[in-house]
Each structure stands twice: as C-alpha cells, then as structure tokens.
Image (spheres, coloured by chain):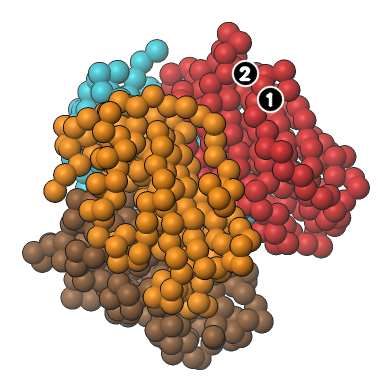
Chain colours: A cyan, B red, C orange, D brown
Amino acid sequence: MSYGIPRKETHFEVRDVQWSEKVRESFDRQGVMGLIGATLADVWPGGCEIHLSYRAALSQQHGFFHAGITSTVVDSAAGYAGFSLMPVNTSVLSVEFKINLLAPADGELLIATGEVVKPGRNLVITRGDAWVVKGGKLTHCAMMQQTLMTMHGKADTT
Amino acid sequence: MSYGIPRKETHFEVRDVQWSEKVRESFDRQGVMGLIGATLADVWPGGCEIHLSYRAALSQQHGFFHAGITSTVVDSAAGYAGFSLMPVNTSVLSVEFKINLLAPADGELLIATGEVVKPGRNLVITRGDAWVVKGGKLTHCAMMQQTLMTMHGKADTT
Amino acid sequence: MSYGIPRKETHFEVRDVQWSEKVRESFDRQGVMGLIGATLADVWPGGCEIHLSYRAALSQQHGFFHAGITSTVVDSAAGYAGFSLMPVNTSVLSVEFKINLLAPADGELLIATGEVVKPGRNLVITRGDAWVVKGGKLTHCAMMQQTLMTMHGKADTT
Amino acid sequence: MSYGIPRKETHFEVRDVQWSEKVRESFDRQGVMGLIGATLADVWPGGCEIHLSYRAALSQQHGFFHAGITSTVVDSAAGYAGFSLMPVNTSVLSVEFKINLLAPADGELLIATGEVVKPGRNLVITRGDAWVVKGGKLTHCAMMQQTLMTMHGKADTT
C-alpha cells in the first residue's frame, strides 16, 4: 500500500472461490457505506481495507471524524476480512466489538483495516485498526477486537 | 418516555448550570448526527436519549441498521450522558467502548440511551443501550460499556 | 441478599430440571475457585452470585484484590448465570468479556453477580458486576459484558 | 525467546532509569502471582512476559486454565508493559480490559505477553496475548486490549 499500513503475513485458505466478488457485492449493498462515502480499497483472504475521505458531515463536535464513524468503517473492514474466509451459502454477523480510540481522528483520510486472527467454524475473531492521514502523515487512531458469527445456510443476498 | 425504555433511578449532582444547553449545543455541532438524521430526544443529569429513524442509507448488507450506526448513536448518547455531569470549561472524549449486538436492528426507529455509572474526575464510565422499534414492539438490540475522558481546561466549542 | 445487591426482575424459563445441581457440581470442579476460596453464594434461573473473602494472597501490588481475581469471579458468576439456562447435554464456554474496574477493590469481601441479558441458542450474552464490602459499606467496583457459547452435545462433566 | 513468541519491533523511550527494578519489585508484591505460581520471565521497555505452569488448582470445570487466570496473567503482563514506561513517582492502575478467548487453554504452560501501543501521559493503551504450550506446540489462546491509568504523585510502594 502506498500509505505503508502494516499487514500481518498470515496466510489463510479460502473456502469459496467467489470470496472477492461476494465481499465486493456485499459491500455495495451496505447503504451506509454510500451515505458516508467509504470505498473498499482492497480485500485479500482474511483481510480488508476501507478508505473514507473527510467531510464535515462525518464529524463529532470538535470537527474530527466521529468515533462512531471510525467504528463503522473498522467494523466493516474487520467483518469483510472474516467474510472473505467463510464458505459458500453463509452470511456474516457482528456479534460484538471493542474499540480503543488512540488519538483524535483529525485528518483528510481515514484508513481502516481488518484482519482475521482466528477463523473458527461458527465464530471468527478479528482485529481492526484505523489510521488517519493528515498532510501525508499517518496516525494510528483506533484499534478493535471483534467477534463475528458465520450464519450457515443463509447466503448473503437481499 | 412513551416507549417505556427502562431508566435507572440514580440521581447525580450537576456541576454546570448550563448542563442541558451545552449538551444540546454540542449535539448540534456533530455533523454526523445531521447526516444520519438523529435527534436528541432527551437529556437529564447523567443520562441522554437519541432517536434515529430508519432509511436504506443507514443499512448494512441485509437492510438492517448497520452495527456502526447503532454504535454511533449509543456512543453519542452515552458520551452526552457523561458530558451533562462535567464541570464548566471542559469537553468530553470517548476513550473506548465495547458493544454487544444482541439482535438484528430491524425496525423503523432506533432508540439509544446512555447513563453514567461512575462519574470520576477524569474518567467517566457509562452504560449504553439500543432498542429497535418495529410495528410498535421494542427489541433490545445492543448494549455498551464506555469510558470517557474529561478534558479539563478545554471548553467544548469550535 | 443481606448485602442489598440489586437484581433485575427478569424471569427466564429453564431448559434443564437439574439447572441448580449442574451449576453447583460444575462450580465445585473449578480448581481455581478452591484455590482462591470463592463460594457459590446463590444461583437462580439466569443469575448467580459468588463470594470471595480477602486475603493477601489475592492482592495486586497495592494490597487490593487483583483485577484478574475480580475478573475470575465475575467471569464465573456470569458464566454460571448463563449455564443455569442451558439445556441438558451442553456445557458452557467463555468466548470473550470486557470489564471496567470502577474503583479499587479495597475491602474484606468481594461479591460478584452475573445475570443473563440475552439467552440465544448458541450465544448467551450476560452482564456481571462486582461489589467490595469494607466495614459494612458496599462499593460497586467492576462491571462486565460477556459472551458465552453453548457447547451442544458436550455434557459438562470430566 | 525459546518459545518463538512474536514481538513487535517498537522502541519506546524510558522515563525512569529504574524501570526494570521497579517492575520486578512491584511484581513480587502482587500476592496473587505467588498464589498461582506465575513468574516474570522478561521485561523490556514497553513490554513484559509472564509464565505460569499448569496445575489442577488453576483449572475451570473442564481441567483447562480458567479464563480468569488467563486474564490475570495477561492483565499483569500488559500492566507491567505500561508501567515500564511510566516516569518516577507514579503507579499503575488497570482501568478496563477486553479479552477474547481464542482456544481452550489446554497445556502445561501459559505464556502471557503485553506490549504498549500508545503511551499517553495519563492513559496508556496496551495489547496482551496468551499462548498455551502443550507437548512443545504453541497455541494462541487469548488476546486483550487494555487501558491503564498513570497515577501521578503516587509511587508504587506499600
């Protein structure tokens, strides 16, 4: 990545040849990603990266990215990291997450990444992170631990 | 409240006579509340309630409220619950939160509440909850534990 | 309870007539409860209370109950709250928990309670709390959100 | 380390020349570390590693390390990672943590590590991990995000 975001070197086996297409198609169906203007920058087996450009409509009361918006993109990045490893005819659900806000998300661009730590049959545990870019400088502004559930027998379609 | 959301009977002492005005004024400055269409339904010493009507632009891939949107309104409700008890010339910052998504947020209206559990001088610990209303029926769909920091000497203004 | 610990008035249906016996029998098999000296003070459908008397061997560096010991008893109280509602031929596993330490656990007795919030078929979501008693006065010193998994087809025996 | 536990390559500046001595001395004062038999295997600026050998007295109901015991050693490892970077005349307090139990802690030895992510003046954010060793094979069994508070003006002594 041009921004130099660190990635783990973990290699996971995919269980659905359509892993990339299904993640992209599902992302496009998330109304909220369109509303806030987030884009799916990259997806790989067990990982995902989402970008979000700043505008005032995404701010909290001091003008920075709202913690909830940061959570929204990190939750999605980590969720799609997990979904990329799930077998056919399943969908993904966020069970819970915890996020630490490490620094004010003050910048022009927010980069969220998610990576699978433990791909269980039913529960998938992930980590997520967010960096904010200001004047070319990256600041690590959030980190997340998340639990996902694989919904077997429910394909991720409308 | 007409929706019968449970409230704790805890009574906290306010440290700023402008507690209600400052919360409402700060809420209005959160760009994201305008973007998603959330309204400050109520604020009381140590508590806050936010309402958000459903529209497709707030959805995850199955058409329900996105977990990040639920987090956004619960984080704000719990944050303003804390801010209502903070003294003059301070502002509020979310340090971290953890949210469990108890049920799909499938409904017409999302109601988020926040309540202070422990109002420390620097750290304020809160609980938050979300209910989704569908056809008049309430479902408890999320619960949160949150840590806030009081920023002394920094009034919450632009 | 003589200590006046608050309890929710929620009533859950049990799915195993042996709910009380199986919780007590499982508790007795937890080696660590014997090591630290914790006792199962009470169990009811969807709830559990554990008591732990102070001794220096349970302390952190300032002489209070160690945060890990507080976590141990709250995790067990919330876990057995969940287990009390699980059907026959299952066992219980902690998936994750988050704990806020609200005050130093400085006292003679630690009281931990757990209560079920959402009893799902596979995942059970609970809340836990701890109070420390010093000279007859109770202080709310910790609160937890926890996710449990029901292990179907694996009875909780050695 | 002989066990091949991964470590970040982050380098932090220490603010107390006695960083190593004060961590070791504080660890020795934690009664609970003696009770369970944990040893401080290593401490470095911003990091810490604790070892704990298995015995039945540390078990949950299925004979594995209890989740609370795992939490106890990871909380201490991450707490001392933070304390190693704190200035003179301070002590350390766990504000909150969240732990995911990734696999049953089934083995002869539990290894807990903690590393600082964000060393703020008042709040220090850390990550912790646990591995269980069985027959020479390591399994990543827990991961934690933790918030610490620096208590200024209160040296960590009895």
- Which residue has dot 2 on it? B109
- Residue type at tag 1: His
Q: Secondary structure at mark 1?
A: strand
- Which residue has dot 1 on it? B51
Same chain, labels 2 and 1: yes
Q: Where is C88 relative to C114, above or below?
A: above
Rendered location of residue C134, percent (x, y):
59, 66
- Residue type at tag 2: Leu
Q: Residues within 10 Å of mark 2 (few under 14, many from 20)?
A: many
At x 77%, y 48%, the residue is B12
At x 44%, y 57%, the residue is C51
Q: Using the rendered view, name the quadrant where residue C87 is placed.
A: top left
Rendered location of residue B94, percent (x, y):
63, 50
Rendered location of residue D85, percent (x, y):
51, 78
Callout 2 touching callout 1 (CB < 8 Å): yes
Rendered image: mark on residue C27: none
The image shows a total of numbered marks equal to 2
The quadrant of the picture occupied by the C terminus of chain D is: bottom right
At x 61%, y 67%, the residue is C135
Chain where mark 2 sits: B
Q: Is residue A75 visible?
A: no
- Spot the residue most to the front: C2
Q: Nearer the viewer, residue A12 or A75?
A: A75
Mark-to-mark CA distance, 2 and 1: 7 Å
Q: Is residue B82 visible?
A: yes
Q: Where is D60 relative to B18, above or below?
A: below
Q: Earlier in the sequence, mark 2 or mark 1?
A: 1
In the image, C49: left or right of D93? Answer: left
In the image, C91: left or right of C119? Answer: left
Rendered location of residue B97, percent (x, y):
55, 47
